[in-house]
Amino acid sequence: MVTVRCVIGLSVQNNWTLYQLDVNNAFLYGNLREDVYMTLPDGLNVNQKGKVYKLNKSLYGLKQAPRMWNKRLVQTLVKIGFVQSKCDHSMFIKSDKSIFVVLLVYVDDIVLTGNCEHEINKIKSLLKNEFLIKDLGLLKYFLGIEVIKSNNGICLSQRKYCMDLLNEYGMSGSKPNSCPIDQNHVLTNLTSNNSKPVDPTQYQKLVGKLIYLSHTRPDIAYSVHYLSQFMHKTTEAHTQIAFKVLRYLKNAPGAGILFTKGTPFQLTAFADSDWAKCVDSRRSVTGFCILLGGSLVSWKSKKQSVVSRSSAEAEYRSMCSATCEILWLLNLLRELNGAVDIPVELKCDNTATLSIAANPVFHDRTKHFEVDLFFLREKIASGLIKTKGVKTEDQLADIFTKGLLPKTHSEMCKSLGMFNFFAHLN
């Protein structure tokens, strides 16, 4: 999804048109390398009873089918001049002199964009010669996500998915909430043990749907991360928090991410952490978000894998996680010919962490996280990353590490570029 967001951001920046194709019966195009035999299906009237048939082509249901389809598609795209991306194997690029075309594929759904309409039409024709393809025209709906073009840019929204989710759980008539999770929520193993256990299957189903919804709703990323920790030991207390998230979604089911033409077109990152957030394990929460040309393309809310001994260490680990994502994005944008200014600003609101990152002198307090220390310092020294202090109230990554007050939460959503297209139709 980060790749998809980057390509959409690039298309908005360069005024490219996005097209969508759909391959009919994609898995039937795969050529099998292994010997696979099947018994005759019921109802097939063949005289040769008791025999099995060897398959030459793959069928739906075979373990080999997805892999064989992918191999066939890659071979076809390479034959017509595309190069497979090293950063994301689902992205293919065709660059020839002044022509630049990008193709994204997810199983049998294809997104096509570039700077030459003639070349795009030519590619469509070549693909139609190889496969039975349905040309869906302009990109409007992809992987359950609505792609809405407006005067401001392109908005990604999952309004229909969100409305279906609210109807499924009987929350379409509920009273809306102004924030997805309370600011001072604390739920330990001790308190949850006092709550009545519930069937984890339904809870897992709900959280799974919320995880998918968070592809266009960064405002619920922290809440979903928190709920995901209780998938196998669920109580009524966890279910109540999950339903509070649904009531929050009822407030603006059409909200999504807006991609606008940014000036300058560069990466900006915010990294934050909440030290010792988990009461049971005392592990901290990493939160970061990365904007491309002012539009949000990547974010994360995740519990750290080790216990941090100080808030500075927790913040430092968060900055290292953001740096890894920045490196990957820079490589991806380099393949997309996206001219991004270097160094990339990485903003943090912890002065101790900024001092550790900038000061080459070895501190006794940092010897237990030496690997992360040298990784970030190396990227700063090479001129790839530039750390910068930011006020706590301007720290956009705050929304990925903790629950916020309604007013602060609303302001953060606006700063992240969230936009409710359906609320502005009137």
Image (spheres, rainbow, N blue to C red):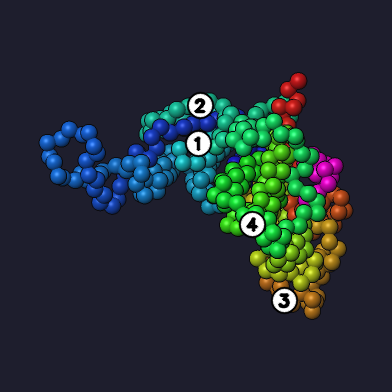
Q: Residue at x 77, y 39 (%)?
A: 177
Q: Position of residue 388 (x, y in %)?
A: 82, 57
Q: Above or below — where is 370 with respect to 223?
A: below
- Quadrant where the N terminus sits is top right
- Quadrant where the C terminus sits is top right
Q: Amino acid at mark 2?
A: Leu
Where is mark 1, residue-wise? Answer: 110
Label 1 element class: strand
Q: Residue at x 32, y 43 (%)?
A: 58
Task: Give the camera-side residue of 411 and 267.
Answer: 411
Q: Which mark is residue 229?
A: 4
Q: Above or below — where is 35 with respect to 120?
A: below
Quick one: which residue is furthest to the left in this view?
Answer: 47
Q: Is residue 20 left or right of residue 411?
A: left
Q: What's the CA distance linking mark 4 and mark 1?
A: 34 Å
Disc 4 or disc 1, which is closer to the eye?
4
Q: Is residue 377 visible?
A: no
Q: Amino acid at mark 4?
A: Gln
Q: Is residue 351 left or right of residue 330?
A: right
Residue 305 is one of the magenta-drawn residues: no
**Other residues around mark 2 within 10 Å, as few (<14) / some (14–19) / many (≥20):** few
Quick one: which residue is furthest to the bottom in this view?
Answer: 364
Q: Above or below — where is 44 with respect to 90?
A: above
Q: Earlier in the sequence, mark 4 or mark 2?
A: 2
Where is mark 3, residue-wise? Answer: 368
Q: Which mark is residue 136?
A: 2
Task: Give the camera-side residue of 1 and 247.
Answer: 247
| Predominant secondary structure, magenta span | helix
| Magenta part of the chain | 403-415
